[in-house]
Structure formats: structure tokens, C-alpha cells
Image (cartoon, rainbow, N blue to C red):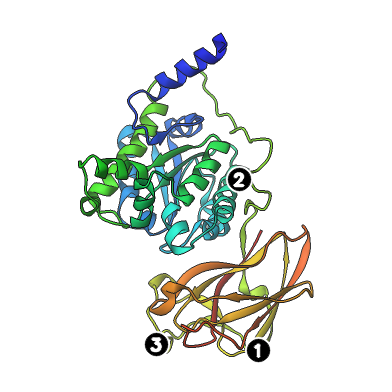
Amino acid sequence: MTFLSLFSAAFTCIAVAGLSPNVHPRGSLDNARIQFESGKGHVAFLGGSITEMDGFRPMVCDRLRKRLPKCEFTFTNAGIASTCSTTGAFRLASDVLAKGPVDLLFVEYAVNDDQDAGHARRECIRGLEGIVRHARAHNPNADIVVTFFVNEGMLKTIAEGRTPLTVAAHDAVAAHYGISSVDVAKETADRIAAKTLTWKEYGGVHPARPGNALAAELIGQVLDAAWKAPLRDGAAKTPAPLPSGPLDEGNYGHGRFIDPKTAVLASGWTLAPADWKKAPGQWRQRFRDIPLLTATEPGAELTLAFEGRAVGAYVVAGPDAGKVEASVDGGPAATVDLFHSFSRGLHYPRTVMFATDLKPGKHTLVLRMAKEKNAASTGTAARIVQFVAN
């Protein structure tokens, strides 16, 4: 081992001394700190219901306010229950970046990529890598922290000595881009094994106060490690270095919504707020008054022009969710099932992809409601919130 490598190893050990082994500091959070110490800063939280709820997020906000009392913070809560990193990548532009450059972005999707989306490794990477690349394309100085929460199945996997698929995939993205990660899942499993915490005390999939406080404390360790020493004189922001290439060329780094108004409706579709009194199942307040592109009968057809390598739709899929047949540029139609296992009693928000890995450029999607449906569905409906493209 060379002197330089010995010095580097020693420095790494010093830098992380006192941290939980489940906290992984990488890169630097100096850009955010420089911005915050200038008097103003934008902090955003992107994730599912664990982010949306009154949990770890406001605790982290309180920590930042106490640490930097002179900073006028703008906090963006971009958590939406049930959504996965795929949806996050496509709504990042409208729900976060449209509010201004982000100085510090917290991302949380390990649980929803597991239990809600059931993602394979590829989709976990495409979603999270897309979020990272898009955020830094918008603001090259953006600092990012990724947090992994936990459910019962993930706990079992950790107890068996393995890393949950979603955690491994997301941490691979974090490592590739030099982003700090906070493994609440492993920390919780370790404390349960040591009998210093129970799953009941933690609070379950949606953590109770002790579980959220644990997450906030681990995130606080990342901030403490990064901001322990005073900023050097003349410290200036430095764009985050990009690796030579992405982990997955098909990542959703150009993800965006496409307004349903741009679709050409051939027959059977309407664009208006849903009549929720007639729609079977429960629905969430955020979807109550927004226009949805809706079809309920087989054969309903539309055409959408888009540009990019991938196309899909952000939908609410209820007990009557059907299947669609999607054809791009006159190619063979792929059948996509909108129904989800959680659709039985809820109009469940999810993103479905109709085509990926297309050649870059302009394309045309033809979407048609299929006659067949999922055996568990009561109908053949589609309710589209937004089309998505990358």
C-alpha cells in the first residue's frame, strides 16, 4: 500500500469516526452549507408516504433551522403516498424543480420500490439515477442525501444476512455519484437484534415517533460529519463531479410529465374531474378536483406525440382498472395491466410504462382500452393523471 493510499484510508476513518456504521458519508455537502450561510436556501424532500407524513421530514427541518438560525429556508414537501422512484423521476420537474434550484435534496423510495412497485433492480436504478441526474442538470451544485427506510419483508432479508434489493440498487446509485446514504433499515434491524428496539416501538412501515426520530438522528450524523469544521475562507460552490457514464443508459434523467390535453382523442375518452361518487373504491383528496383523462369502455382510443426514449402514464388505478394496448410508431401493441394489488379498495397512484429503450427522437403512441381485464378487476377503466416521457 502506498503512502497516499494509507493517508486516504486514515482520513476516511477519521472522517467517519463516531458515526453509525449504517451512515455512509460520501462527497461533500459544502455547496448546501455555503448557500445556507448566505442567508437563504431551498431544501426539498422527495419520496412516498414516509416523506409525506408528519414524520422524519419536519424533524430534519427543525434540525436545519436550529443549526442555521439565520437562514431563511424554503422547504418543499414532495412526498406522495404509494409512489415509487419511477414516479418520482417523472414528477421531479413539476413538483420540485419548478419551485427553484434545490440546494439540498432528500430522497426516500426504498420501501415503495419494494412493496408498492415491486421493482427489479433495473427500475430501482433507472428511477433514482434519473432523479439524481435531473436534479444536478437543473442545479450542478445540488447536494443530495438518500435514505432507506424499512418494512417487515426487508427486515427479514436483513436478518438472513442479505441486503434488500431496493437498498442495494439505490446505494449503488448513491456510491456512483458520491452521494451520502442513510440506511435506517439496517440500523433498525441491528437495534432489534441487539434488543434495544422493537418493531412495535419503531412503529412499522410508517414509523412512529421513535422510528422517525431514529431516521432524523442518522441524517443529523451526516450533517454533523459534513459541517463539523468551519468553512474555509473564500469557500465557493463547486459543481458535483459527474462520473464518466451512467449506471443505466435508460435512466429517467430527462423524465417529465406531458399534459393529457395534448393527446388526440379518437373516441371514448373524456378529460374532466372524476365523478368520485360513482367510481368504485376510495380515493385520495389530492386527486379529487384535477382533470383526469378517463375511459371506461373497450376500444376507446387516443394518440399522443412525444419525444424521447420512453413513454408511459401516471394513473390512478381503482377497483375497475382495466388493461391498455400500447403501440409506438405503428409497432406491435403491448398489453399493460393498470390494475394493482392495492387497487381493490383504492384508486391507487402508480406509473406504468408503455415502452422503454426506444431510439431517441419523435414518436407516436396509440393507446387503446383492451377488452380483457385483470381477473380481480370489476371493469375496464383508465384514469390518467399525466402522461410521462423520458
Horizontal and vertical percent position of residue 242: 63, 36
Residue that numbered label 3 is attached to: 277
Q: Residue at x 25, y 54 (%)?
A: 203
Total count of labels: 3
Horizontal and vertical percent position of residue 349: 47, 69
Marks 3 and 1, the one that precedes in the sequence: 3
Give the CA separation, mark 3 to mark 1. Answer: 25 Å
Residue at the extreme front of the image, as rendered: 160
User: Residue 326 appears in which quarter of the rendering?
Assistant: bottom right
Give the CA separation, mark 3 to mark 2. Answer: 41 Å
Q: Which numbered mark, 3 or 2, is in the foreground of this view?
A: 2
Marks 3 and 2, the one that precedes in the sequence: 2
Q: Is residue 194 visible in the rendered structure shown here?
A: yes
Type of amino acid under label 1: Gly
The answer to which of 189 and 148 lies nearer the viewer is 189
The answer to which of 93 and 301 lies nearer the viewer is 301
Residue that numbered label 1 is attached to: 299
Q: Residue at x 34, y 43 (%)?
A: 60
Question: Image height check: is 119 above or below 343?
Answer: above
User: Residue 365 appears in which quarter of the rendering?
Assistant: bottom right
**Relative side of 81 to 329, left or right:** left
Q: Which numbered mark, 2 or 1, is in the foreground of this view?
A: 1
Few, some or many residues within 10 Å of mark 3 (<14, 14–19, 20+): few
Mark 2 and mark 1 residues within 8 Å of each other at the beta carbon? no
SS for callout 3:
loop
Horizontal and vertical percent position of residue 217: 30, 38
SS for callout 2:
helix
The answer to which of 240 and 366 lies nearer the viewer is 366
Few, some or many residues within 10 Å of mark 2 (<14, 14–19, 20+): many
Marks 2 and 1, the one that precedes in the sequence: 2
Res 133 label: 2
Type of amino acid under label 3: Lys
